[in-house]
Amino acid sequence: GEGPLVNQDISTTLELPSQLVVGIAMRPTDYLKVVADYQFTGWESFDVPTVDFAENGRDTDLILDYQNTHTWLFGAVYEAAEDVDLRAGFRFNTAAERDASVSPFLPEAERNYYSVGVGYDVSDDLRVDFGYQLVDQSDRRGRVRNRTSLDQTAEELNVGVYSSEGN
């Protein structure tokens, strides 16, 4: 058949984001290890890729318009007993999407991650670990339709609120 909904090849090119990660680990006592990391991700490379339809389709600009993100991570492991380790962690990262870019494609916002865990050495050859993480993401206004121009503002586009939480 003819028209935009026929089987056809498409292609696009995405420049993957650059990343910089630095970290440090310290052991202030024999029983405690603390770690801290920072991560920069260059999401601005996800700007406006073109989806190229091979036949009969209209090439489409996918306006992503992402921004760079920063992530901070902190963690600790405490050896509570010879065979028991207690763990805790915290992570915060900024959002990759600008206000006018929030959509069902990636309905994300600033996030806080809270983690706890315990590890138990059952024997020399067997260890059991349990962990829990809460991902607390801020609510964020967003759109449901594609952007057609970088000139469109969040006030023009955003018609709803995205909420997310993970366990």
Image (cartoon, rainbow, N blue to C red):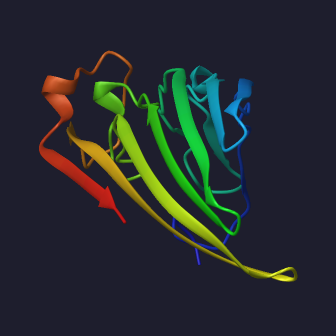
Instruction: Please identify the quarter of the rendering in which residue 123 is found.
Output: bottom right
Position above or below: 9 against 149 = below
Image x and y of residue 17, in percent: 70, 29
Question: Is residue 18 in view from this perspective?
Answer: no
The residue at 62%/28% (across/down) is: 36
> Where residue 117 sits in the image (x, y, percent)?
52, 62
Vertical arrangement, residue 5 with respect to residue 48, above or below? below
State the image coordinates of residue 25 (x, y, percent, origin top left). Answer: 73, 30
Instruction: Tell me: 46 left or right of 149.
Output: right
The answer to whether one can see residue 13 in this image is yes
Q: How many marks?
A: 0
Is 39 or 86 nearer to us in this picture?
86
In this rendering, position of residue 106 left or right of residue 62:
left
Report the residue that reaches farthest toward the right.
125
Quarter of the image for the N terminus: give it. bottom right
Looking at the rendering, in which quadrant would you find the C terminus?
Answer: bottom left
At x 12%, y 42%, the residue is 159
Image coords of residue 41 (percent x, y): 63, 26
- With 162 as the anchor, is 93 left or right in this view? right
Q: Residue at x 46, y 40 (%)?
A: 90
- Give whichever of 98, 88 is nearer the camera: 88
Q: Is residue 123 above or below residue 154?
A: below
Q: Quadrant of residue 7?
A: bottom right
51 relative to 40, above or below: below
Determine the residue positioned at 50% across, 44% down: 89
* The one of 124 and 103 positioned closer to us in this rendering: 124
Foreground of the two, 165 or 23:
23
